[in-house]
Amino acid sequence: METIIDNPLTNCGSRSPSVYVVIPNKNGRSHLSYSLPSLFGTNYDNYRVVLVDDGSTDESAGYVRRDYRDVTILNNSGKTGFAGAVNTGIRHALSSNAAYIAIFNSDIKVLPEWLNMILPIFAREQNAGLVGFAEITKEREELFYNSTVNVTDVVYKNVPRLAGCLYICPAAAFKRIGLFDEDYFMYGEDNDFFYRLKAAGFKLLETNVPVWHYGEGSSQNNKLLPTWLAYRNALRFSIKNEGLLGALRMILALANQGCNPFLRQPADHPVFRRMRRYNPVFNILLILGSCVWNLRHLGSTLKSRVVRI
C-alpha cells in the first residue's frame, strides 16, 4: 500500500537536519564528472559530501580535490571493497554527528529536490530505517529527465529490499545494527544490511522519487568480477541469514537465473543482466565455484550471523 506525503520539507535554516552523503569511489573519474554536478545541484541547505577513494589509480581524488573543494576526501586501501569504503564514510559521518547518512553511488544522477522529497518521510514514519528511490537504468535516461515528481507528489511503500545505488538512513539505524559486512566486498552487502534492518524492526520504504543509475560504474573494466561476486555473495547471504535450507534454495535459484534458457526478464534489469552475462555452462562453473568458496569460508560466515553493534 502506498502512502502519500502531505507535509513536504521546506528549507528552514539551522533547524534542517544534517545529511552526510557518502560516495564510495574506485577509479570512477568518468562517472564523477556527471554525478557530482548532479549532486551539487541539490537545493537542500544542510548536507556534506564525503568521498571515500578506495585505492583509485585514475586521478579521481585529484579531480575532486581540484574542482570540488567542499568535498571531504577519505582514503581506503582498496582491500575491503565497496562495503569497506562505505563503512569508512559512515564512521566519519557518525563521528561528525550526522542526523542522516545517504549512501550515494558514484554513477548516479539525482533531482535537485531529492533530499527535500525524502526527509519528511522519516518525520512521518518513526520506525523508518531506510528510504530508497525508484531506479532508472541508463537505457531509459529520458524517464529521469522527464520526471514530473515533485515534493507534493511523493508516495512510498514498505518493501523487503530496494535499489542499492542510493538510499538514506538515520544515523540511529547504524548505531543500532552496525555497519556493512565487509566480507561481501562488493554486491550483496546492501541486501544483508536491508535484512538486518528488517530483523531489528525497522521499515524499508521505497519512494517514486527517481534516481538515474549507470550501473557497475566501479567495475566497468572488469565485467567478470561483478558477475562472480553476485553469485558468490547471493549464496553467502543465504548461508548467513537463511540457514541450510535457504542456501539450498539459493543454489537452485542461481541455477534457474543463470542457466534456464526459458527464463525471461527485461534485458535492462541490472541483476538479470549481471547474472546472464555469460553462457549457461560458464554460469554453472560460477555456481560451483561459489559453493566451494562458501564452504571454505563457512566458519567466518557463521560467526558473522551475530550482529555486530
Image (cartoon, rainbow, N blue to C red):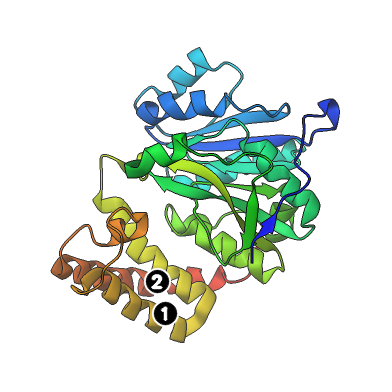
Tell which of 198 and 5 is nearer to you.
5
Residue sitting at 48 percent across and 40 percent down?
A: 105
Image location (x, y in percent) of residue 75: 51, 32
* Amino acid at the residue labelled 1: Ala
> Is the residue under label 2 in contact with that under label 1 (CB below 8 Å)?
yes
Where on the picture, by quarter, is residue 202? bottom right
Q: Which mark is residue 247?
A: 1
Residue 155: horizontal and vertical position, in percent? Answer: 64, 53
Determine whether 171 is above or below 294 in the image.
above
| Residue 121 x, y percent position in the rendering | 73, 50
Residue 82 in the figure: left or right of residue 5: left
How far is the residue under mark 1 from the one under mark 2?
A: 6 Å
Q: Which residue is mark 2?
A: 235
Q: Residues within 10 Å of mark 1 (few under 14, many from 20)?
A: many
Q: Nearer the viewer, residue 222 or 99?
A: 99
Residue 30 visible in this rendered orientation of the protein: yes
- Residue 112, x across and y down, in percent: 59, 30
- In the figure, is residue 153 to the left or right of 287? right
As shown in the figure, which amino acid type bears the numbered disc 2?
Answer: Leu
Q: Is residue 299 visible?
A: no
Which label's residue is closer to the chain start, 1 or 2?
Answer: 2
Q: Which mark is residue 280?
A: none
259 on left or right of 191: left
